Image (cartoon, rainbow, N blue to C red):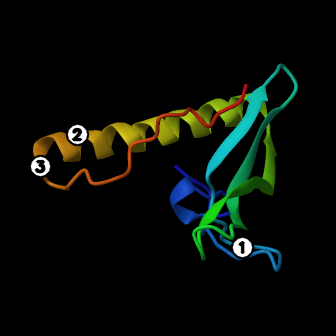
Amino acid sequence: MRKKSEKSKKDVKMEITENPAFRAVDTSGVFGGLDPNDGRVIFFLDRIKPAMKNKPRGAMGLEKINRELQVEVHMSPPQFISVAKWMMNHAQRFQKRIKSGKIKDDAPKSSADSYIG
């Protein structure tokens, strides 16, 4: 029998708040890695900087690509592995929905792996 002062997991309430620095970011890719002490991921956004050309008038070329680092996230190795599994589970469920025809696969195909180990 449970004492009144004890709480079960059902009695614990979860409160979700946003840190004042919370923000949503767009990303082109991620790099990072895992070692025995730390797991980290750095999300980046690639921005294309055009170069204006005189001939033909109004033509543009590529001047440079600016890789803007958006946010760096550190976590323990077990948490890193847990997040990786969580992401893979979502990716696999999404792929199953595509194969079943429940959703259309119209996402652009990437020819490059954006992860840098």
**From mark 1 to mark 2, how far is it between C-alphas?**
31 Å
Residue denoted by label 3: 101
Tell me which label, 1 or 3, sits earlier in the chain.
Answer: 1
Residue placed furthest toward the front:
55
Picture quadrant where residue 113 is located: top right
| Disc 2 residue crowd, few under 14, some 14–19, many 20+, Cα 10 Å | few
Q: Looking at the picture, which amino acid does disc 2 mark?
A: Lys
**Residue 16 placed where, x, y %?**
64, 73
Residue placed furthest toward the left:
101
Quick check: 62 left or right of 2?
right
Tag of residue 96: 2
Say which of 26 and 59 sits in front.
Answer: 59
Q: Looking at the picture, which amino acid does disc 3 mark?
A: Gly
Q: Looking at the picture, which amino acid does disc 1 mark?
A: Arg
Q: Callout 3: helix, strand or loop?
A: loop
Vertical placement of 44 versus 14: above or below? above
Tag of residue 23: 1
Say which of 81 and 25 sits in front.
Answer: 25
| Disc 1 residue crowd, few under 14, some 14–19, many 20+, Cα 10 Å | few
Tell me which label, 1 or 2, sits earlier in the chain.
Answer: 1
Are the residues tagged 1 and 3 within 8 Å (C-beta)?
no
**From mark 1 to mark 3, how far is it between C-alphas?**
34 Å
Quick check: 66 left or right of 50?
right
**Residue 13 placed where, x, y %?**
60, 69
Picture quadrant where residue 37 is located: top right
**From mark 2 to mark 3, how far is it between C-alphas?**
9 Å
Which quarter of the rendering shows the C terminus? Answer: top right
**Residue 70 placed where, x, y %?**
77, 59
Q: Residue at x 56, y 64 (%)?
A: 11
Tell me which label, 2 or 3, sits earlier in the chain.
Answer: 2
Q: Residue at x 54, y 34 (%)?
A: 112
Q: Residue at x 25, y 50 (%)?
A: 105
